[in-house]
Amino acid sequence: MHDLPDTHPRAASLRLRYTIAEHAKTGLVAETGPVSHGRGEAFDYILGEATPAPVMDDIRAAAALLLSAKWPVISVNGNTAALAPEAVADLAKAIPAKVEVNVFYGRTHEREKMIAEFLASRGCGDVLGVDPQARVPNLASSRGSVDKDGIAKADVVIVPLEDGDRAEALVAWGKKVISIDLNPISRTAQTATLNICDNVVRALPALAKVARELKGKQDEIEKLIASIDNAKASKRIFAFMRERLARLEEEMDRRKKG
């Protein structure tokens, strides 16, 4: 992978894939992590591997929601830690927000500690979630274990690369949930307060940038929060995907005709 030229049309995507594979060897990423990454990558192809214009509206609204929170928390699993640790750190500083490790597969003290130390080494400071003592109500999976000073206390939680069960349970617990999910038909995307249909490596830096731009602009922040409608956001991204696929089909037909 080190000899992959920057001119390769898939260079950025292939490097992300390689990053996930390498961290799966160390245990930072779960064994099933590459499968999850590949599923998201398939949807990213449809987006054109770029942030769609309508999603920028969702990013602005999400940044406003984070800025309005009394106790915002960024939940981080193995894939997010591997792909965007510096971006997590930057967003946490921009809000500011707490960072908490929360994983589904292979949840042990050793793995939680590994991810927390990895994030800390990339600028995240004190990372919560190692040996958590609180629980999300009505959630039986290992992701139900949360930090009493983190997600348990949070009013707004951002959950990149989430599983639907916990997103749904967090909303039922009274939390505002911002998901980052490339699959707009996933349960996570559909049950979140607001889903950002984008690649985590693009969405997190964009959120930090917008958060810094919005700070102190209370009227704009309130207008953006009032505009949040996840059903409408889903419809916008479905329309974008349909239009893009139609354009691709037209381009294929033109090439065939010569």
Image (cartoon, rainbow, N blue to C red):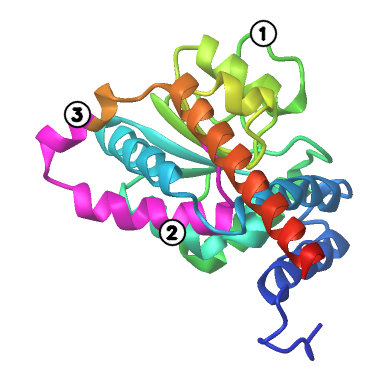
| Residue identified by numbered label 3 | 223
Q: Residue at 61% of width from left, 17% of height from top? A: 168
Residue 197 in percent (x, y) is at 55, 41
Q: Residue furthest front?
A: 257
Query: For this rendering, which residue is in front, 34 or 61?
Result: 61
Of labels 2 and 1, the one closer to you: 2
Q: Type of residue at label 3?
A: Lys
Query: For this rendering, which residue is in front, 243 or 90?
Result: 243
Q: Quadrant of the N terminus?
A: bottom right
Q: Type of residue at label 2?
A: Pro
Q: Secondary structure at mark 3?
A: helix
| Residue identified by numbered label 2 | 205
Residue 56 in percent (x, y) is at 39, 46
Distance (Cα) linking label 2 and label 1? 33 Å
Where is 87 relative to 177, above or below?
below
Estimate how packed mark 2 is, as few (under 14), some (14 to 19) or many (20 or more) residues with alpha carbons within 10 Å. some
Q: Secondary structure at mark 2?
A: helix
| Residue identified by numbered label 1 | 138
Query: Start and end of the magenta stretch?
Result: 196-223
Estimate how packed mark 3 is, as few (under 14), some (14 to 19) or many (20 or more) residues with alpha carbons within 10 Å. few
Q: Residue at 57% of width from left, 19% of height from top? A: 191
Distance (Cα) linking label 3 and label 2? 22 Å
Where is 172 relative to 123, above or below?
above
Query: What is the chief secondary structure element of the magenta stretch?
Result: helix
Q: In the displayed structure, does residue 36 sit left or right of residue 214?
A: right
Where is 81 relative to 238, above or below?
below
Q: Residue at 79% of width from left, 91% of height from top? A: 3
Residue 102 in percent (x, y) is at 64, 38
